[in-house]
Amino acid sequence: MLLLAVLVFSLDWEMTVKPGAERKKAPVQAVVVDAGKLDAEVQRQKQLEEKKRLDEQEKLKRLEQRAEEAQMKRKQEEKRIADLKLKQQEENRRKKEEASKQAEAKKKAEAKKKAEAEKKRKAEVAAKKKAEAEKKRKAEAAAKKKAEAEKKRKAEAERKRQQEEARRKAAEQEMQARLAAEQKRMAAQRQSAMQRMINEYVGYIQEKVQRSWIRPPGSGSELSCTVEVRLIPSGEVIDAQIVRSSGNPAFDRSVESAVFKASPLPIPPDPEVMEQFRSLKFTFKPG
């Protein structure tokens, strides 16, 4: 093409004929093009294209690495939450086992105490057979004392049980509050990460559309418009419409054409974020 252009513009196309004079053919002047320079220019263009392609591959590689790091962080956070839940379950199981052991020990102590009291009573009865009146008085006094002691013991046991129950409920409420706060923090981090990824990929899309855009004649650099694009999960463009016109129909059509030409567009690797890219709007303003 360069050779053809040089040959065309090297011809003398002036065909002026003076009145009354014979029409003569204008001499054709040809310029010889250095084939070596032409090959060198072609080779230089190929090298530029290859460098551009390598730069694009490196950029995509960095994007993929960033996505993998984000996914690894999310998995680590999920594992940490699972470990917290497992630790809470283990703590609840330990408390139940401890309460069961305490109840069993209490039951044995009460049985032992009752057996000793019964043995003592029988000994007293055997030793004081001849003093029935005294035995009866002492027995009544012992029964009354025992009843009061049992009543006091039960009241103390109930008080301790209520205290233990209150401590257990407070610990459970504190743990639930911590879990709720942690889940809220994680949700906020996830939302922030998603928004950063959305902004990042909208920028990538704008850059790719910019590279595919051809400025129409007569359009100024101050023009801009808002375009709505519909995508499928592969990044292919299925529709592109101007929702805020620049006021220049040729400029608007060139933007729509650039969007289709840039298809497929860069899309985020996160499926949840990708759902927000099925239909997106962005402002196109020439750089």
Image: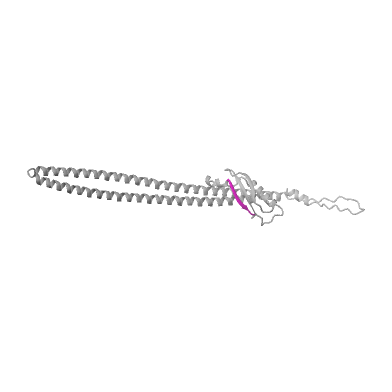
Q: Any magenta on residue 281?
A: yes
Residue at the outermost bottom position: 222
- Residue at 50 percent across and 49 percent down: it is 70
Q: Would you say the magenta stretch is mainly helix, strand or loop? A: strand
- Whether residue 44 is visible to the viewer of this picture, yes or no, is no
Of residues 258 and 223, which is closer to you in this image?
A: 223
Of residues 264 and 64, which is closer to you in this image?
A: 264
Residue 91 at x, y = what percent? Answer: 35, 47
Q: From which residue to which does the magenta span run?
A: 278-285
Residue 133 at x, y = what percent? Answer: 9, 45
Residue 220 at x, y = what percent? Answer: 69, 56
Q: How many marks?
A: 0
Q: Is residue 271 left or right of residue 92?
A: right
Q: Any magenta on residue 102?
A: no
- Residue at 59 percent across and 47 percent down: it is 279
Residue at the outermost right position: 20
Of residues 255 and 154, which is closer to you in this image?
A: 154
- Residue at 38 percent across and 45 percent down: it is 86
Q: Is residue 45 left or right of residue 15?
A: left
Residue 204 at x, y = what percent? Answer: 59, 50
